Image: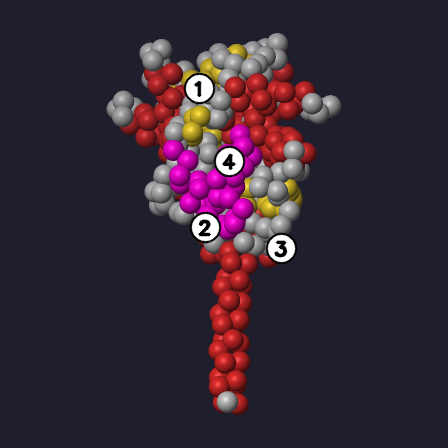
Amino acid sequence: MRRREILGYAGRVAGLQALGGVAMTAHAQSVGVSDNRILLGQSAPFSGAAEQLGLQFHLGAQLYFEALNQKGGVNGRRIELTRLDDGYEPERCAANTRQLISDGVFALFGYIGTPTSVVALPLATEAKVPFFAPFTGAQVLREPFNRYAIHVRASYFDETAAIVRQITGTGIKKISVFYQNDAYGKAGLEGVTRALKTLNLEPASLGTVERNTVDVSKALADIMAQKPEAIVQISAYKSCAAFIREARKRGFVGNFYNVSFVGTQALLDELGPDAKGVVVSQVMPFPYTPVTGISGEYLNAVKAKQGRAANYSGIEGFVAAKVFTEAVNRAGRNLTRDSFINAIQGMRNLDLGGFPVDFAPNKHTGSKFVELTLLTEDGRIRR
């Protein structure tokens, strides 16, 4: 009888240990999730030459999350977004990413830029942490397919293809490229080159600028030597603005074309009257009037907060937060990183109010939306 009691006790202990192992596994999959909170981490430039991109994206996401949290969150959990400044420098971003993963965030959210995201994604992948809605369209982050990389916006290939179609559709063939000398600039250059190649064309001339600098003198000389008719820019807003001002002083009268990462409002603010003739491709709906349901939702959120202003970087953060929340809601109360990713993959042809997203098990880029906008010398953005 004593032997049976001992064996029964041992069996109960083994069962409890097994249950404990299951609980520990579930807990390990749910890092960053508590009964009432989901913790996200963001490394972005909140200082330096690209600070407005990080700041406005963050504020846009917070507009959505704060309104959501006031209503009780999603499935009873508030969503909290903690941020660290990387100054748009890869080394600082890598250190921030390690810290955020160590601090136990559920996902990495809204990283800004290609060179920073390129160093962060391998760290996220190794730790099996979702890398959600980076503010970049670089193909190197999309191919090969990565289960943990989830993109809401269209790619730079999509943007540059639209730009080249617009330029060449007017009969222009001499197109030069001014690009940032890093992974971002080279990704954009590749997109322009690919699009031109389909038309049996190539860039007329090239000029580069170093990240976080505005020394554009050599790039200007290199590009202008070939007398281009249009110039595509793949850089941050401060260097693009510096190049545009100097080119205008030299008498260049053609149009400048920028991809969305430039930061439309930031570029407009930098240029002032020199904004005339500058085109920017956009991957988000027009944020200044309620032309779509999501634009109206965003504008209402902006109006509810004093001191906030609508802009493209802000609506991208807002949209990213909305998509994230939709996936969390679909994953249900038993939220894990795997159930979150599975929920993303089940979001097929979802209309967010004039902005459709479509994911799948082997497709983690939700949108191919691109439209071109024109900046004006009186400080407006025209569709």
Q: Residues within 10 Å of mark 2 (few under 14, many from 20)?
A: some
* Residue type beneath disc 1: Glu
Mark 2 touches mark 1? (CB < 8 Å): no
Q: Disc 4 versus disc 3: distance between alpha carbons?
A: 25 Å
Give the mark count.
4
Mark 3 lies on residue: 103
Q: Quadrant of residue 154?
A: top left
- Residue on which disc 4 sits: 326
Please tell me the numbered disc located at residue 338. 2
Position of residue 29 measured from the top left corner of the image (x, y, whole percent): 51, 56
Q: Amino acid at mark 2?
A: Asp
Residue positioned 44% across, 42% down in the render: 343
Task: Estimate the x, y position of residue 255 in percent, counting from the top left.
Answer: 47, 15
Look at discs 3 and 2 and give the one toward the viewer: 2
Range covered by the magenta-colored residues? 319-348
Q: CA distance from mark 2 to mark 1?
A: 34 Å
- Residue 371: assigned label: 1
Which badge, 3 or 2, is on the more N-terminal residue? Answer: 3
- Residue 205 in the image, given as x and y percentages of width and height: 39, 26
Main SS, magenta residues: helix
In this rendering, does residue 379 appear at all?
yes
